[in-house]
Image (tube, rainbow, N blue to C red):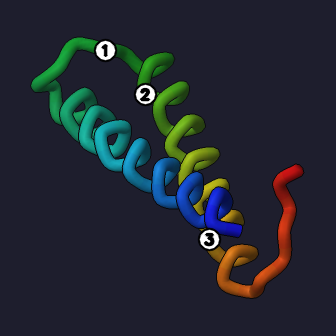
Amino acid sequence: MNRQALLGLVFFLLALPVARAVVNIYRGRWPGGPAVLFYLRMLLGFLLAGAITLTFYSFVGKEILP
């Protein structure tokens, strides 16, 4: 379960720079178009969903990783 909690934390920490990149591209500070924003938002959603799921199951005490 420690691996699950650690992986959930890593996913959350990876989501932070992705969210910052989305904001900077949306405001026009960084180059990028609608396709890049779509990709980064999808990546952000998967990272946050993975972080929430892994953290929740590690708190509950259920092992979901092999």
Image quadrant where one finds the N terminus = bottom right
Residue at the image point whose x is 42% and y is 47% from the top: 15
Measured along the vertical axis of the image, is residue 36 above or below residue 21? above
Residue found farthest to the left: 29
Q: Nearer the viewer, residue 66 or 32?
A: 66
Q: Residue 37: x, y in percent?
A: 43, 28
Q: Which residue is mark 2?
A: 37
- Percent x, y of residue 41: 50, 38
Classify mark 2: residues with Cα within 10 Å, few (<14), some (14-19) or many (20+). some
As drawn, is 17 to the left or to the right of 37?
left
Residue wearing tag 3: 55
- Looking at the picture, how far across and down is residue 52, in whole percent? 61, 67
Q: Are marks 1 and 2 in contact (CB under 8 Å)?
A: yes
Q: Amino acid at mark 1?
A: Gly
| Label located before the other in sequence (1 or 2) | 1
Residue at (84%, 68%) from the top-left corner?
63
Cα separation, mark 1 vs mark 3, equals: 32 Å
Sequence-earlier tag: 2 or 3:
2
